[in-house]
Amino acid sequence: MALENNEYREQRLQSMKALKEMGYEPYGRKYPHDDLKKVRETFSEGAAARIAGRLMTIRRMGKMNFCTMNDGTDRFQLIFKRDELSETAFAAFKQLNLGDIIGAEGSLFTTQKGEKSLIVKEWTMLAKALEQPPEKFHGLADQEERYRRRYVDLMTNDESRERFFMRSRILMEIRKYLWGLGFSEVETPILQSQAGGAAAKPFETKFNALDQKMVLRIAPELYLKRLLVGGMNKVFEMGKDFRNEGIDRSHNPEFTVCEIYEAYGDRTNMEAIMEGLLPHLCDTVVGKRVIEYGDDKELIDFNPPYRRVSYNDLVKELMGEDWFSLPFETQLAKAKAKGAETDTNLELDGVNDTLMLTHEIYDKLIERNLRQPTFVTRLPHEFVPLAKACEDDPSLVDVFEFVVAGRELCPGYTEQNNPIEQRKALETQAGEDTEKVDEDFISALECGMPPTGGLGFGVDRLVMLLTGCEGIRDVVLFPQMKKV
């Protein structure tokens, strides 16, 4: 295979040499032109046009030759006629290859088959492609190769390129929506002395100037809350988090998040944000509120209102109204009968067996079957140390998990603003690693943080939902891959 590629490259080097001898510099300069999409939309028979893009197909037919150009906005047919070009320009056309980038100007024309085209009067070489593109520009067949060589995937795959344009528009509209609600966008440190805001393994590095160990942040939460203490009452941040953990269809160690905090609010404020944001994104970017998701084209309806149901009620729906009063041995037998794969010894960090068994049932048997947008509320306090307890039941916290298509898209909290209770929760989470408790954050809370609602969602997972993709690497331009 390497020999074939070398032969192709050698042929293209010879074409480049021939072009140069004809006066066509292989790598051009600035070339003002109109986007092909605009040319198509404003098409007028016989009008002059100036375009530029990559050659996707070439058909040589003697005195009349045809090419298809793609500039990322559209595809357009070019016609190279011998009697419309200078002798040199027509001869130089023979040296063009698939993948070359050219500029062309001429007059617009509709063929007998009704195809809008440009009859080329002059053309300019802008970039010679030395590598042979995938066969017939059908794109990379190898999925992993598409991720490793995203530039070729984008070059050859209109669907992939449009997906990333859509991602860009989604990010823009998230910002516009939150700005419209009066939120300020802020930036907090990515390089931190201590990882906080989540339970995850950080990437470690070193700050040489201070001779100090540092980590890449796992979440911006604790810094954003410091801003609330300082009087910035409505803030959000959209940026990168890093977690030194596994890679699968929904996890990448470098990922994009959006965290939102509103002083004097609570969980219900965050529900309202999600219930407004998703229809906004559907209307402004996708163009519809019922979206096809995944390979089986499952229909997800983002029209509000969304279902609200408590964690315990979902468990009772599946396991019976008496679930929480049953002996553990009976619970375990019922769980296995329902198909839960679990151990008899479930004790973990002092959390009782029933709690862990219940959460495994929720995780394996309930959450994955919540297909339409659902706010799952009132979770056990052991799982959410940064949230405030429910007023009527301190064993539960006033939070939601927003679940769509069987996956959690984001949590939303009534945030804990009591520094004494927050310290207890963080110390319990840290266990023997007491140095993991962020003392500066506790100090900030002791200055007084208003009652607050907060949420954080994975932007990559949101893009997956709105573009119908089931794999995170399909919506991340350059996903992490094992070096080869």
Image (tube, rainbow, N blue to C red):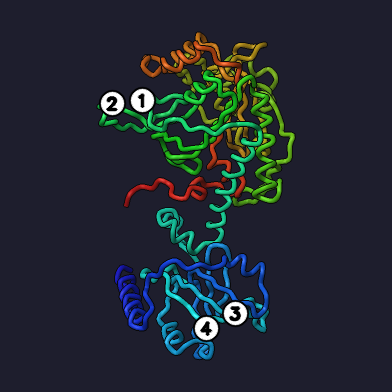
Q: Is residue 334 visible?
A: no
Q: Residues within 10 Å of mark 2 (few under 14, many from 20)?
A: few
Tell me the CA gap for discs 2 and 3.
Answer: 65 Å
Residue ID for mark 4: 80
Please report the residue visible at 50 percent of the width from the left and 14 percent of the height from the top. Answer: 445
Whether pointer 3 and pointer 4 mark residues with C-beta atoms closer than 8 Å, the reply is: no
N-terminal-most mark, 3 or 4? 4
Q: Residues within 10 Å of mark 1 (few under 14, many from 20)?
A: some
Residue ID for mark 1: 193
Identity of the residue furthest to the top in this view? 420
Residue ID for mark 3: 107
Residue ID for mark 2: 212
Tell me the CA gap for discs 3 and 1.
Answer: 62 Å
Q: Is residue 417 visible?
A: yes
Tell me the CA gap for discs 2 and 4.
Answer: 64 Å
Mark 2: which amino acid? Gln
The label nearer to you, 3 versus 1, is 3
